[in-house]
Amino acid sequence: AKAEGGRRVRVFEPDMEERQHQRRWLERELKLAIESGQIALHYQPLFDLTTNAVTGLEALARWHHPERGWISPGEFIPVAEATGLIDALGAYVLRTACTDAMDWPGHPRVAVNISPMQFRSGDLDQLVEQVLRATRLPSRRLELEITESVILSQDRATYDMLTRLRRLGVRFSMDDFGTGYSSLSSLNGFRFDKIKLDQSFVRNLLEKDEAAAIVHVVAELGRTLRITTTAEGVETPEQLARLRASGFSEVQGYLLSRPLPAAAVPRFLLARNDL
Ligand code: C2E
Ligand code: CA
Ligand code: CA
Ligand code: CA
C-alpha cells in the first residue's frame, strides 16, 4: 500500500492480497513437492559432551523448488500446518528418516520433529508403529522431538497418545525448551527422555547473565530428573566450553557439524573414530 500525503507508515503494512496469493501458491507447490519427492532430508548430528560420540542425528526437511530455489522449513512448515498438508509431510519425513537410519554405521538414533498438528489426527501412534515395522528400525533408535506446546494443551487425548507412543518404545525429546509460557509445568506429568534447550539461550550465553543462569539451572534440572540435556545452536568454542562446564549432556550446532545431506551421513559416521 502506498502512503498518501507524505505519511509513510502504511508503506510497511503487508499487502494482504499479495500475501494470500503467495500462500496459495506455496500451498499448491508444497502439495506437489510432497507427492513428487522434492522434499529432502538433511541430518544434523548430536554429540555426547563426555565421550564425543555421535548419539543421534536430527532430520531437518529441505525443499528445493525448481524455480524458486531453496525454501526454508521456517517458511513451509507453518503453511503445511495451516493447510493440513503436515500429516502427509510428517508421514513422509518419518518414513524417510527411519529408512535412512537403517544404513547408519554405529546405529545412532534418529530424531524426527513432530508438529503439534500431527497429534490432532489421532493416529500418529499407528503411523509410527507401521513405519517401525516396515523399516525394521528398533523403536529405541527413534526419538520424537516435540515442543512443549503439545504438552501444555493438557488434554486427555494428547496424554493418551503420548502414552501409546511410549509403549512402542520410542524416546521423547522436548524441543525448544524455555520458549513456551510455562516450561516447567510441561515437564510435570509426562516423562521426557531429553530436554533440548532452545538455541536463543546458547546465543546469549556469554553476553547475558540471565542466559548463563538458565543454562546452569537446566543442566541441574536434567541431573536431578535424570534426563539428558541437549544444547542446540552451538556456534563457538566459548559456548561449548561453558556448556561443558555446566554439565550439559549433549550439544548440537554449526561448530560441531552443519546438517548433512542424507547421502553424506554414512561416510561421516565411518570417518569418526568413536565407532
Ligand atoms: P528446530 O527443530 O529447532 O531445528 C533447529 C534449527 O536450527 C534448524 O533449522 C537447524 O538447521 C538450525 N541450526 C542448527 N545448528 C545451528 C547453529 O549452530 N546456529 C544456528 N543459527 N542455527 C542452527 P532449520 O533446518 O531451518 O529448521 C527450522 C525449524 O523448522 C526446526 O527448528 C523445526 O521446528 C522445523 N522443521 C524442520 N524440519 C522439520 C520436519 O521435518 N518436521 C517438522 N514438523 N518441523 C520441521
Ligand atoms: Ca528440533
Ligand atoms: Ca529446537
Ligand atoms: Ca525451533
Image (cartoon, helix red, strand yellow):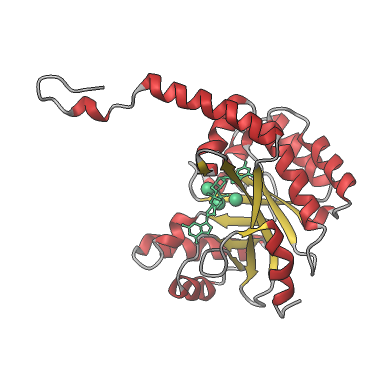
Against 189, is 7 above or below? above
Determine the image quadrant of residue 256: bottom right
Q: Give 269 or 261, whichever is nearer the viewer.
A: 261
Residue at (46, 22) in percent of width and height:
21
In the picture, measured across the screen, residue 6 lies left or right of residue 264, that is left
Determine the image quadrant of residue 85: top right
Query: Residue 49: x percent and y percent?
Result: 61, 73
Query: Residue 31: x percent and y percent?
Result: 64, 29
Q: Give 144 or 100, whichever is nearer the viewer.
A: 100
Q: Residue furthest front?
A: 67
In the picture, measured across the screen, residue 44 lies left or right of residue 106, that is left
In the picture, measured across the screen, residue 124 lies left or right of residue 221, that is right
The answer to whether residue 154 is visible is no
Against 146, is 51 above or below? below
Query: Residue 208: x percent and y percent?
Result: 34, 63
- Where does the C terminus fall, quadrant-wise? bottom right
Query: Residue 166: x percent and y percent?
Result: 79, 46
